[in-house]
Amino acid sequence: MNLIQMILWITISACVFALSLLIHKEMVEKSVFSTIARKYKTQHRRRKAEENWFVSKYGVIENRSIFYKLDRLILMSGLKRRMPHLSGETFLGVVILSFVGTAYFGGVISKNWLLGLFLAACVVTVLFIFVIFHAGQTYNRIEDDTSLFISILSNHAKSSSDIVTIMSRTLPSMDGPIKELISKFLLHAEQTGNVDLAFDVMKESVDNRTMQTIIVNLKNCMHYQANYEEVLQQMMNQVSEALSAREERKNILFSMKITLVSVSIMSVIIIYLIGKGIGVDVKAILTGNLAGQVILFITGLLYLFVITKLFGVDK
């Protein structure tokens, strides 16, 4: 009987393997994977082209689409430099797969589905914090280099009144995210011949309010033939004020983080003291029944939400 079962399993395995080979061969011959990848790239390029056209025709408005927001977050993080194929859809797919996988395996291993869901939420939080952290680094790098950018622009504005020429001469002296912004501006200006659109796309490619203001002012200078040197000097004063405000904001956020940690530690201590004082094992009550686990689960989600928000505003 064992021999018959072994033969049966070998036959089934061989059939499944042969069927897999046939399916793979058919997919390769019909270029299924290439077709899917090409369709995805075409849709991604079409969506970007539609966004650029909309900006040029109607200006910038708030887009509430989750794919747009994720695309923008990935763009601001600078991760596309190391992972060119990364997009909002790809990141969302990774998040969903990570959540489902962690929730399933966490629930099976711990035999507690609430714990599995909380671990899945932790993994998703870590993924978002990773991207938000890199976006914050890009934001701060732009803010730190803005004074140098204005200074170099002002120097080249003395010898030219054409903003494209001024930008092209400024490009070699810059580095990091601002250099990428200038390169994108020059590329769109050259490809489309529409400097207005190049400014709009440049503005949409940065999340730093100070830099966005500078871009809008440069665009207005181009239209009204204003003196770039005078406007840039005024913007230099605005940048100094923005940097001072950033330091104040950093101190406030640091205080908020210290308060969050202190409240967390004191909560644990208070629960422990209450349990000792009245002779009740509070930890067992919270972890030993469904109601207590639900309370801990909701509290944990709130903490994850607060932590993510702190990272989001800590720029």
Image (cartoon, grey):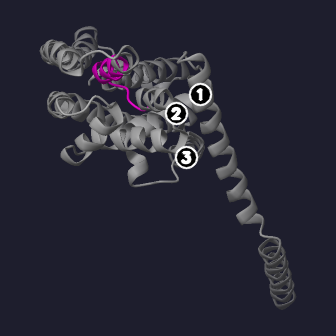
Label number found at residue 269: none
Badge 2 element: helix
- The location of residue 215, given as percent across then percent down, is 34, 23
Please, what is the three-letter code of the amino acid marked with disc 2? Leu
Disc 3 designates what residue?
Answer: 94
Badge 1 element: helix
Does the magenta run of residues contain 214?
yes
Disc 2 designates what residue?
Answer: 70
User: Label 1, label 3: how many angstroms apart (C-alpha)?
Assistant: 15 Å
Q: Earlier in the sequence, mark 1 or mark 3?
A: 1
Quadrant holding the C terminus: top left
Q: Residues within 10 Å of mark 1 (few under 14, many from 20)?
A: few
Residue 279 visible to an observer of this rendering: yes
Q: Determine the residue positioned at 28% across, 8% down.
A: 278
- The location of residue 177, given as percent across then percent down, is 30, 40
Disc 2 + disc 3, Cβ < 8 Å: no
User: Label 2, label 3: how many angstroms apart (C-alpha)?
Assistant: 12 Å
Residue 122 visible to an observer of this rendering: no
Q: Give the label, 2 or 3, closer to the camera.
A: 2
- The location of residue 181, given as percent across then percent down, is 35, 38
Label number found at residue 66: 1
Disc 2 + disc 1, Cβ < 8 Å: yes
